[in-house]
Image: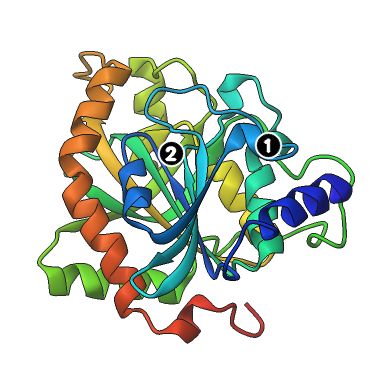
Amino acid sequence: MIEKIKETTEYIQSKLKDRPEIGLILGSGLGDLADEIEDSVIIPYGEIPHFPQSTVAGHKGQLVMGRLEGKSVLAMQGRFHYYEGYSMGEVTFPVRVMKMLGCESLIVTNACGGMNEAFKPGDLMLINDHINFTGANPLIGPNIEELGPRFPDMSHAYTPHLKDQAMKIAESLGLPLQRGVYAGVSGPTYMSAAELIMLRKLGGDVVGMSTVPEVIVARHMGMNILGISCITDMAIGETIEGITHEEVMEVAARAKPQFKGLVRALLKEVDDNLWKVQEGA
């Protein structure tokens, strides 16, 4: 694992103009933000040693590095999922590389189904916390001390001061921003009505098939994390009517202006020091 991470990191470093400060993982239908990165360097995943390939519609499958709102960023235009047949180690491998390249913070985004009846399609939700219902964990197996501790603390997986900043900035923009718990499942099937009712009763506000493994690994490596979900459909077990991936993409496309506006404002307005890992965090 370490050798693969180092080989990948060295390859990407050879292409970089700057050391990246902030990593971005752009979920289904939200990848267009990477097209706005200035002075960009683009590397297709197929050219990167040890990188998996994205197989899902709506995921371009490339790294985009450059500057956005004055910050040096490294964006994944498309992620990897457990349901594609990749191991949890492969799904989260890019996060390891981001940290080795210099990213201290990670903004992770996704498209998801809303289980909270107060939400509606097109809403953005700040992730307060998550429930790992994937049935797996990317840290299972021998621990590599060079990467992080054997038993990382997940009590504050999503960095409190970044969440506070996001809420203030959303308010200043007049953008309604929900807050809630993301329930992560393996997929690729959408949930049954009974499963949705169960997840809601367990405390989930939205449900999706990504994000949780990446966040676990980012916390293992001591990164700051900010999570934003785009609610593309309502997944209320008692009244669910079914959904397709195409419908998910359609709603995500409609929410893109608000999503991009929020992320750009965060990068612009949040003080540089708040993106850095705080002592003792």
Q: Image quadrant of residue 147?
A: bottom right
Left or right: 75 with respect to 110? right
Question: Who comes first in sequence, dot 1 or dot 2?
Answer: 1
**Residue at x-position 20% and y-position 67%:** 170
What element does badge 1 sit on?
loop
CB under 8 Å between discs 1 and 2: no
Q: Residue furthest left?
A: 174
User: Which three-letter amino acid code belongs to the residue tagged 1?
Assistant: Phe
**In the rendered image, is residue 234 in sight?**
no
Left or right: 260 with respect to 38? left
**Residue at x-position 67% and y-position 33%:** 136
What element does badge 2 sit on?
loop
**In the rendered image, is residue 229 in sight?**
yes
Asked which colour scheme the image uses, the reply is rainbow
Q: CA distance from mark 1 to mark 2?
A: 35 Å
Q: Nearer the viewer, residue 240 or 145?
A: 145
Q: List x then y, in percent, for residue 130.
A: 48, 48
Where, quadrant-wise, is the N terminus in this rendering? Answer: top right
**In the image, is residue 82 above or below residue 4?**
above
Mark 1 or 2: in front is 1
User: Which three-letter amino acid code belongs to the residue tagged 2?
Assistant: Leu
Tag 1 residue: 51
**In the image, is residue 51 above or below residue 262?**
above
Q: Nearer the viewer, residue 36 or 224?
A: 36
Left or right: 264 with respect to 192? left
**In the image, is residue 28 above or below residue 131?**
above
Q: List x then y, in percent, for residue 83.
A: 57, 22
Q: List x then y, in percent, for residue 212.
A: 54, 44
Q: Which mark is residue 202?
A: 2
Q: Image quadrant of residue 82?
A: top right
Q: Nearer the viewer, residue 236 or 28?
A: 28
Q: Residues within 10 Å of mark 2 (few under 14, many from 20)?
A: few
